[in-house]
Amino acid sequence: MEFKDDLGKPWRYEDDGLTVTRSCVWSPPGCHPVGCGVKFYADEDGTLVKVEGDENQPVTKGRLCPRCLTLKDYVNHPDRIKYPMKRDPKYRGQADKWERITWEEAFDLIESEWKRITAKYGPTSVAVWAGTGREGGTFMPYAAAIFATPNYCYTQSGYACYLPRMAASAYVLGAVYPEIDFAGGLEGTYDNPEFKVPEVIMLVGKDPLPSNPDGFFGHSVVDLMRRGAKLITIDPRTNWVSTRAAYNLRLRPGTDTALLMAMLNVIINEDLYDHDFVEKWTYGFDQLAERVQAIPPAKAAVICDVPEEDIIAAARMYANAKPASIAWGLATDQKANGQQMAHCVMALMAITGNIDIPGGNIIGGFADSLNEPGFGFSTMTDETKDALLGLHEYPAYCGMLLNAHADLMLKALETEEPYPIKMGLYAGNNLLAGTCAAEPRRWHDAMIKSLEFNIGFDVWMTPSTQSTCDLMLPLTTVAERDGVVFTHYSSLPVTYGIMTPAIKRIGETKSDMELGWELGRRLQPEFWSQYTDFEDFVSKFRLMGKMSLSEAREKVCIQRGHTYRKYEKGLLRGDGQLGFNTPTGRVELWSTMFQRFGDDPLPYYEEPQYSPVSTPGLLDEFPFVLTTGARRYEYFHSEGKQIPYLREIHPEPTFDINPADAEALGIAQNDMCVLRNQFGVCELRANVSPIVKPGVVQADHGWWYPEEDPNEPHLYGVWRSNINSLIPNFHTGKMGFGAPFKCILCSVKKGSLADEMSHEELIAGGYDRPAHLDWKEGRNA
Ligand SMILES: Nc1nc2c(c(=O)[nH]1)N[C@H]1C(S)=C(S)[C@@H](COP(=O)(O)OP(=O)(O)OC[C@H]3O[C@@H](n4cnc5c(=O)[nH]c(N)nc54)[C@H](O)[C@@H]3O)O[C@H]1N2
Ligand SMILES: Nc1nc2c(c(=O)[nH]1)N[C@H]1C(S)=C(S)[C@@H](COP(=O)(O)OP(=O)(O)OC[C@H]3O[C@@H](n4cnc5c(=O)[nH]c(N)nc54)[C@H](O)[C@@H]3O)O[C@H]1N2
Ligand code: SF4
Ligand SMILES: [Mo]
């Protein structure tokens, strides 16, 4: 009752001489679109002086991560880019030499370079470099529309994040994205009478407490545990949730498909499946049942290094619970065998009848599909669209969101085949910093060699913008801008969260939407004339034109409701028929789409390309199985390294190694170590801990040092601890998805890179560690 009374709190009010604005966070700083509620406190000068969680946000109810709790230091940081800046191209890839210009000059330069370059090399020579689903990432459709290029490119090899899961969902279920039902869209959340608490939640390669991915409020797992939900975790690394799980299946990285096939085997052979659902709504059950005989639990136990009895018990526990849900994470995408893993996850949800039921896995309906589909392609000819890099080689990938294949983009940059790439724009990407690119040195060299004009649009100068850009545009932070946060990028409605400017804008920054609005009207005036003003643009683009931004702002967070069992109501298909939006109208356990794209229509297990089983000959040299990038509360990828409190919690990159392995190698806690394989090398500090098993190491990603020398070759120390130097490009699955970010081999040795190479090599490679490396003494202290 108390909580309901408080809901009347307006979107803005005065408190003790400060102006409080209630807002929902997306980016920047980067996060995924949960839309956590914050209260921004501004003083009379319009300066941000305090940030608190908003207890009236119906889903997050005041809870915040350290990244939001330290937003004040981010927003007010002296190192932010405040004005447009240009650099003479002769210094690109060389030196930190920038001069301040006006926005008018910046727009003139963009327009003239775009015209010059496309006149010479054609419309496809322009690329938009996107990173993960920050608002900048969803900038893609209109950035592509502005430059009339099909080549929006998420640069991570095999698009090894979310798209593989999204595509598998679209192909197998005809809907995206089966997410655990955490009641976020329902009034009263868990207390809504329509909702049921899941009896079991299975977490597969996902750690939602730190990651809160794609619109899923991770802490709801804790809320649901408090209401009785039991957990199963499938993860090679022990984490907070797995220590609370009934079963914690600590598998060898990269072997999930075998484990999940064995669970399907148990559920089918022991007749634990939902006959009614299977009969009415699935296609190919008998073939799936036959296929999973290939991997009985005893075999999976050997492949995955998990006790057979635990696989059987976990399968029974999941199948006997109703409702039960599965949260499946990034580990699905970061392997070549990931589409088959995704297929198994959805088969588990389907044959137990847990799809789109209260407390099961909910999916988006036909009417909830992505904002203005095809928007980005409305300003170009069919011939230009057809030239999208990878469309013909990897239609399952490139046809899904209409975006260029990452690996083929690298090839085009390196070889100018099938055509040259000469101009680019970063829309939320820092690919060199051990993030959105495998073998980042290759991307660095290729971009510098190939590009004639590259635009950075960021809050900070980053290693990527510093080394590859000619023009740098200043970006607003979440406290200064308008916008809408939509969960699961709108495809699975839970909430709309409204971002409201709360402080006086710092410098001459603009938001992604504002840049799109201004540049769009300039370069594509005819197309942009469909929007009457900025608000109309935001409303159509983000709120599907359902309401105006001003109306939405007053509500702060809009819970969108959920219609369960849409397949029984004709709400999943464009033709209004019952069933799922697949060619057979059913959940395809035997996938007609996978077959059409040249892959096996049924799940199969394939070893990672480099593993103790597939490449035993490499084990002498590279004896450890390496998985990377498990999320931390302090950082969002390469972000946050400038924020003193966050840096204090985790000052330097680390990797987890089991005490037995550490002892054998003479490694003690916090020792500097060199990790190496056939693709590259880096140095990280050891976290000696039993959270990983002997033979497995888990390493941080996303490291650079904003306090260090920005000039090449040092480039903020970005090469020294860059774990992605060890991850290769061109190692995707058959349909073009996935890359071995979470399953590769490496060696571990105590010592630093300075022990491994000559002083000249160290400097030339940019691997040197400044003598007194102390971020607190750096210019950002
Ligand atoms: N080894 C390893 N590597 C990984 C991963 C892993 O697990 N292991 N994970 C991978 C995954 S899943 C992903 S998605 C990628 C992420 O990779 P990226 O998305 O490239 O992440 P960042 O490198 O942090 O770069 C994003 C940049 O965008 C800026 N930014 C933040 N918000 C906004 C915004 O709203 N608009 C604009 N224009 N800019 C903004 C930030 O300041 C930052 O400089 O990393 C991948 N890299
Ligand atoms: N704080 C923070 N939050 C983030 C991000 C961030 O950088 N920082 N990044 C965002 C992005 S872009 C994404 S994609 C999401 C990702 O969020 P999640 O899907 O949660 O992904 P990760 O944290 O990379 O990995 C999840 C778990 O997979 C485990 N794992 C590693 N290898 C394997 C394997 O082979 N099999 C299985 N089953 N498990 C494995 C790891 O130990 C880890 O516990 O997080 C988003 N949220
Ligand atoms: S998930 Fe954490 S960092 Fe992201 S918006 Fe919510 S509180 Fe902020
Ligand atoms: Mo991601």
Image: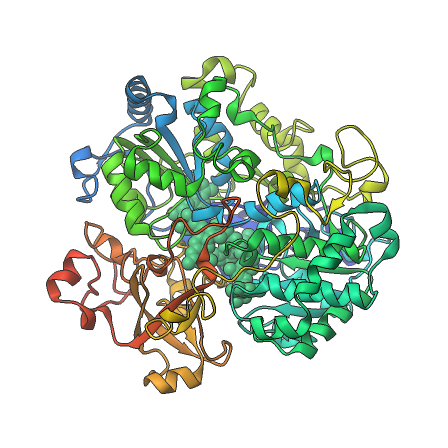
Q: Residue at x 44, y 21 (%)?
A: 384
268 and 65: which one is in front? 268
Is 762 on the left or on the right of 746, as rendered? left
Q: Is 273 situated above or below 115? A: below
**Residue 536, position as x, y percentages in the image:** 59, 23
Left or right relative to 156: residue 248? right
The residue depicted at 38 percent of the width and 50 percent of the height is 729
Q: Residue furthest top?
A: 526
Kindly identify the residue that appears in the image at 19 percent across and 65 percent down.
Answer: 770
Give residue 635's quadrant in the image. bottom left
* Rendering quarter of residue 222: bottom right
Q: Nearer the viewer, residue 506 or 763?
A: 763
Color scheme of the displayed model: rainbow
Q: Is residue 537 above or below residue 236?
A: above
Q: Residue furthest left?
A: 760
Identify the image quadrant of residue 664.
bottom left
The answer to which of 608 and 299 lies nearer the viewer is 299
From the viewer's perspective, tell me whether residue 261 is left or right of residue 211: right
Looking at the image, the residue that sits furthest to the right is 276
Ligand 3 occupies quarter = bottom right
Residue 436 position within the rendered picture, expressed as x and y whole percent measured from the top left? 41, 49
**Residue 227, x across and y down, in percent:** 77, 67
Q: In the picture provided, is 450 more to the left or to the right than 260?
A: left
